[in-house]
Image: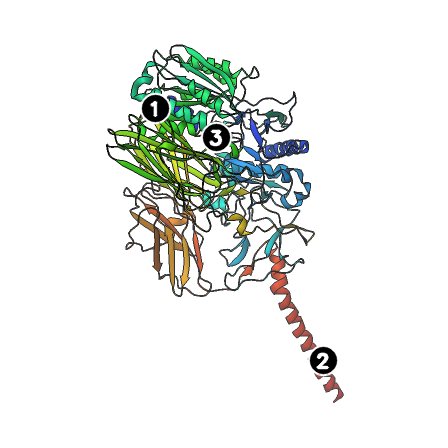
Amino acid sequence: MVLGKPFNLVFTCLLCTYIESCFGLSLVDNGYRDLVIAIKPSIKHNEMLLEKIQTMITDASLYLHRATKNMVYFSDVKILLPSTWPGNSSILRPKTQSYEKASVIIAEENPKYGDTPYTLQYGGCGEKGQYIHFTPNFILNDSLLPIYGKKGPLFVHEWAHLRWGVFNEYNEEMPFSIAINGRIQTTRCTKEITGSIKDCSSGSCSNCTINDRTRLYDKGCNFYPDKVQTGSSSIMYNQGLENVEFCNETTHNTVAHNMQNQMCDCRSTWEVINKSEDFKNANSTHNGSVQPTFTLLQAKGRVLCLVLDISGSMNEENRINRVRQAAEIFLLQVVEPGSLVGIVTFNSDAKIKTQLKTVDNDNVRKDLVKLLPTSASGGTNICSGVRDGFKVLCGDDGATNGDEIILLTDGEDEEISSCFKEVEENGTKIHTIALGPKADKNLEELSRRTGGLQLAVTDKVDENGLNDAFTGLVSEDGDLSQQAIQLESLGRSIDKGGWFSDIVSIDKTIGNNTYFVVTWEDSKPGVILHSPRGKIYTQRHFQSEDATHTARLQIPGTAEVGNWVYNITNSGKTQKVTMTVTSRAVDENVAPVTVNPRVSWEDPKSPMVNYVEVSQGFLPVLNAKVIIIVELPSGVTDEHKLFDNGVGADTRRNDGVYSRYFLNITGRGRYSFKVRVEGIEGPSNLTSKRVGDAIYIRGLTIDGVVHPNPPRPTVSEENLVAQIGNFSRVKSGGAISNPVDIPVVNFPPSKITDLEARVLEDRIELEWTAPGADLDQGTASYYEMRMSNKLLLPHSFSGAEQVNLTELNPQPFGSKEMFIIVPESTKLEKRTTLYFAILAYDEKNQPSKMSNVAMITSVEPLPIIDNHRPRTILITVIVLPLVCLVVGLLIFWYKLKGKQEDEERLQ
């Protein structure tokens, strides 16, 4: 199939719908517009914070323009203030901007990184990050300047992570390595950066000692770059140095052991940046002003309107009652206290069921439920419903900026495009729910143009998709303590006399406003619920609504921590029954465990990647079981387990981001995603994320003298480990709409990223994780491994000596592979260094990318120090002592000779 321009345009629009909103940050005339910096609601009001943010971005704009060879800068910046801060007439209302979708957040510190700025990155090379995180103390405290450098260059360092998907060129875990010539080298870019290598851990600086086992410097030894550099240095290495720019193909250090080389196949940062969409679309240079404009925005409380389809087709598949069930869960359990809510229904015309009501007590919630539709008839006029929704939203202050519409429809409307322009200019965010297979194909255009969520639901009731869609529509203001969290979503078709049971785990971070909700089709099922302490709730404890076929139980007070077991029985005819459980945080000062699914898909010829971030606040949660459930347009359900093992689609191991490729998108239609997460009780569920953080400058060398900064604050591992216990989470992952048939693409195996080599006497043990045949799916056909005494790069791989792996049959994806070899052509003699790399092949002989390079050295040589002032160091360490010895011997010989001559004269 040939993909022409019309298809590419349609595909771009579908990507913008859910995967990456086209509405928001953009590059216009070389200037970045609508850069949103959002302050978390928990941060206290501070006017100086706003001034410092503006100064940082102004400096960063000038620096970015220079670093990108006069191409791009920051043009339009919006600072989103918490609703609790004092306002004034100069502060505007946001349109679609929110804390959850901001490019930059100002929030409390991450326990691992303290005040160090960082960028959260899920994906691989060239993929955009999620957000940049600054703390208020970093912004306000100028005493941190010696430690991180000027804030403008630092912001550009983080911007490169976020916008262009490049990585750090330093490595705190491996700051030194052994070069090909056996010398110790510093991990840096460029190699021309000069400085001193000293151990200043004791308070005074001394020469470094070399560890007998590692042959590298002992812990405590650091590289202190010269403050004044004669050559250039890289922004992604040390943002605090002068003369910094992005490393290019000429200056890049391809042999440095850093994330940039590992993730981007040894390409320089500038090569990656230059191939981004920004630089494909930007003009060659921008010679005008680079001064950004700033706009202060302040969100009010949540204001939303339900706009629900009641056309005749809603009578099919019991849709009208299912919508009532799901909307009831939303109004009674999900919408945040203090929100303003209105309701509009539409068929051929629209009708306002209620103007905005303040949700400040349970009676208001119940009154809203009574206004939900119970019958359906007529045609479908989507725009009439949207326009009446706008009228309702104007009811509080006469404006709709920052408000929300939840639009649900199952029908087609030839006139839907008539309100596209009006919707885009209105400032209201529209979340769309496409119900059934015939919902208008252009429905998602409304969410695309307004930055709303795109959701799709099939008529497969036992997947509970409609309840999931409404339950996932929580506020995006960043206040997790007020958000409803879904713990369970399960449906089953139960025969007469049949039953099903399951477990819902409530952890210590949640438990307030906990609801168990059962829905059914025909006759009320039996329900028994056991609390962790043995209390039994039966059907009589549930409040039943026969009209909507719903039974609801609210657990009094705070729900017990532990495993809740429910059992549902069916005494009537075969029917579909669902269980939905929601809860809220137990303490506003303790972040609950949350689940954040995302989808990445560049184009139809590239694989789709599912990412699920599981975290408690800024700390990632490990050892969870994460399942992605995909409803295909055909109605078939496809399930896959996601991994946090650093293999395949997962770029970093143990960062709390679980990933997997999804390759089953071929037919037209909507694909709906849902995530189930189960936490396993253990001693250490939490660890720290590996992210794109700014380097902590340990000090500088000035006129040959090292001036160290205070050591980086240590973080107790106890602060990074929490006994969460068992937990359950379910979250809708949205939907995508595929407009055309896509041929099956035969992808090669995924790149092996964890190849390791160890010396065992005269043998070498090699270990890695098996890729799949198609990326991370299935089993590869065979491997090709090569070794060399020179560093292996992709272009030199085929010329290196091949290792015989014919007896090794690849195992399925995720399995551990191990192989032991005895080198024949290269004896493991003193100072023998060998490099290894590997490829995997599929059944069609398609190779993966070359793996990471593993290195071994057979015995411990005495390394030669090679860095930064090599001639000076060699003269000091080796040449000068030899000269002194020779001079001493000459003096001794002349004295001896002179004494002999004197004795002869005396004779």
Q: Amino acid at mark 2?
A: Gly
Mark 2 or 3, which is nearer the eye?
3
* 691 lies left or right of 843: right
Mark 3 or 1, which is nearer the eye?
1
* 550 lies left or right of 473: left
**Where is residue 883 drawn, in percent x and y?**
64, 67
32 and 569: which is toward the camera: 569
- How is this picture coloured? rainbow
- SS category of the residue bearing label 3: helix
- Residue under pointer 1: 546
Residue 898 is marked as 2
Q: Residue at x 31, y 46 (%)?
A: 780
Q: Amino acid at mark 3?
A: Glu
Identify the image quadrant of residue 69. top right
Between disc 3 and disc 1, whose residue precedes?
A: 3
- Residue under pointer 3: 277
Answer yes or no: do the residues labelled 1 and 2 have beta carbons within 8 Å? no
**Where is residue 166 drawn, in percent x and y?**
50, 39
Q: Quadrant of the N terminus?
A: top left
Between disc 2 and disc 3, whose residue precedes?
A: 3
476 and 597: which is toward the camera: 476
